[in-house]
Structures are given as C-alpha cells and as structure tokens.
Image: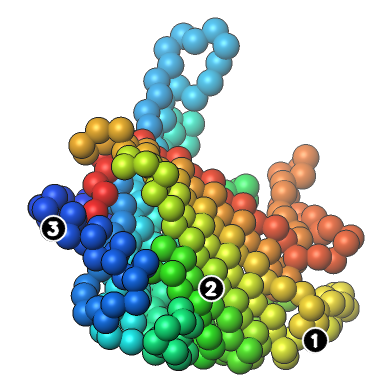
Amino acid sequence: MMKKFYFLFSACIMLSFYSKAQLGDIDKMQKSFEYTDKDTVAWIHGGTCQIGMNQGLLHNWNAGGEIASLTVNGVFSGFLTRVYHNQIWSNNLDLAYSLFYAYSNDFVPRKNDDRIDFTSKYGFKIDPKKPFYLTTLFNFRSQFSKGYNYTLPDWKQNPISDFFSPGYFTLAEGVELRRGTNLSFFLSPISARYTVANSRYTSMTGGAFGIEQGATSRFELGAYFSGRYKVDISKTMSFKTRLDLYSNYLAKNKTDGVTGRVTHDNPGNIDILWDNLFSWKFSKYFGMVAGLTFIYDNDFPYSSTYVNESGVAQSKNDPADLGWLQLRQVFTFGFEYKF
C-alpha cells in the first residue's frame, strides 16, 4: 500500500521543478481567457499536491489514550486544460490515500481515505460571444486498494470493496456554462452511468453499490448536473467546490427475494456528491489541505453492522428506508507543492 504514497510523492517532486516564470505566464493566460473574448490557443494547468503525517506517543499517561500512532496522508488535486479557438478540452484529477497505524492493533495499517476521481470534458462554443459550450463529459470514480469494515471481528478476511469494485463510469452529452477555468456548470438531459464490481462484493444479500446480488454491473440512464467553482482567496489560500446531481430515469422499487424488504426508488431520488477542498500554503514547500465530502445515494440503504454483547456481528437498519448520507473529512499538514 505504500506504493501509492511513493507515486504521489514522486508526482509532487517532479511538479516542483516547474519555474515560477512559467506559472506567471499561466496566470496571465487564465485571466485573459476568463475576461476577454480573444481567440486563444493555450495549455493551462494548476493544482495542489501534498504529503503529510501525524504522530502521537504516550508513556504512563494518567488520562489514558493510544500508546503510539501514526497517520500518513497523500492528496493530489490538479487540472489540465487545452484551449483551441472555440474548442476546449478540460481534465480534472483528484487522488487521495491515507493509512492509520496504532499500537493497539499491532500497527496493522487501516485505511482512512482512498479516492480516484477523473473527469474529462470536450466542448465546442455554441456562440463565439457567449460562454456556452456543447460538451461531452466522461467521469470515472474508484479507489486504489481493498476497503474493510473495521467493526467486524474478522474484517481482515472480509474486504467490502477494492479497485474497480466499485468502479463508476459516467458518459454525458449536454450544455456547459464556463467562466475561464474556475467556474463551470454542466447540464445533461441524457447521461449514462455504468457501475461495475467483482461478484465477490455483490454476493451478500441485497447486493452492493446498487448492483443486484451476484451480478457484476448495473446500467443507469438519467439526467446529470455537475457544477465546479474554484477561487484563490489569496496568493497562499485557495478553495474549490464541486456539486454533482444524478437522477436515474430507470429507477423503480426493488424487493429483496430473501428478506422480502422493499427498497423504494424513483427518478425523484437524486444522487448527490458535494466535494470541498481548502488549501493553505504558509511557506514555500509546506502547507495544509482540508477536505470535506458528502454523498447521498439511495442505492446505499441506511444500514450498519455492529457487534453485540456476545461478540456476534449483527445488522442494524433504519426504518425510514432512505439512502445513507456518507461523510468523509480529511486534514493533511506537511509537504505541499502548488502549481
């Protein structure tokens, strides 16, 4: 698993060799592209790469606590855009990985964060004087390595996810409103979403990731909205946010063949992904990154597994029969390169 960190760290080092003069030219090009209608041909790029760690140690500590712990985090967020007259090709890549080591579990690494999120868009300007583009969008989301439910007593033998399990693919055609590289609103009335997973992870009752029990894929057709906004608060601080909404036209109620439980679904159940990232670079090569992500998906029922007093894993279900609101928060302090 440390290979993921070597990959992120190497990427940061290579990016750090870009000159400040080049960054200045890119800043000028971004402003020119954003605020004028001039015919432009350019490559524009930017982003943040950070590697950090947190460490703690206690000895004869009266109040108690973890004797020794270590957390290692890696975060990369970047974009690459090609502007060619009235055409634009934009790419966004977000990567994250985090491991937690503790004395209480023999320093066996536990995953805190794991993310691969890539979006590529190609657009053609509808009217040279207006910021609207006819755009095709592709998005892929997955993770680097196996994920576990650490509340289970035998979690090591029972991973619940892995690379490409799940893997989410979205292909959409629509209209995009763009203001330079920092503001984008994309709306598609027809978009296809394809979810894949190994049958090992969908063999449980009810399936997993919205895929039926024993199956390996699921196809959805619906409406899709994606909005992105980035602002440089100062020369050292930046904030970006992203909101994705998806309505599946094919959604309908499903009945579990074993338990008889009915999962209510319809196109009005909107899947939501809201992602936020704040970056503060307080010295040349050091800074902090704070991220907060919310996900609501009706395909993930509000249920959790807990261990009862007898040490047996049991499932707890919420009677509201709603989707599960998922939350992920990360904070990384350490080596940072902003490009």
Colouring chosen for the image of the structure = rainbow
* Picture quadrant of residue 225: bottom right
Amino acid type shown at disc 1: Lys
Q: Quadrant of the N terminus?
A: bottom left
- Residue 241 coordinates in the image, percent (x, y): 51, 57
Residue sitting at x 21%, y 79%: 41
Rounded to the nearest whole Å, what is the CA distance between mark 1 and mark 3? 53 Å
The percent coordinates of residue 295 (x first, y second) are 63, 61
Instruction: Measure how far apart labels 1 and 2 are at the Cα level.
Output: 28 Å
In the foreground, 87 or 298: 87
Q: Earlier in the sequence, mark 1 or mark 3?
A: 3
Give the answer, above or below, for where 242 lies relative to 202: above
Q: Which residue is at the front of the view, 40 or 172?
A: 40
Q: Which residue is mark 3?
A: 22
In this orientation, which residue lies closer to the viewer: 41 or 147?
41
Residue drawn where x is 77% and y is 44% of the image: 308
What residue lies at 45% left-to-right and 49% top-to-bottom?
239
Which amino acid does the dot numbered 3 rest on? Gln
Residue that label 1 marks: 252
Q: Earlier in the sequence, mark 1 or mark 2?
A: 2
Residue 118, x across and y down, in percent = 40, 72
The answer to whether residue 98 is seen in the rendering is no
Helix, strand or loop at label 1? It is loop
Query: Which residue lies under the disc numbered 2?
Result: 185
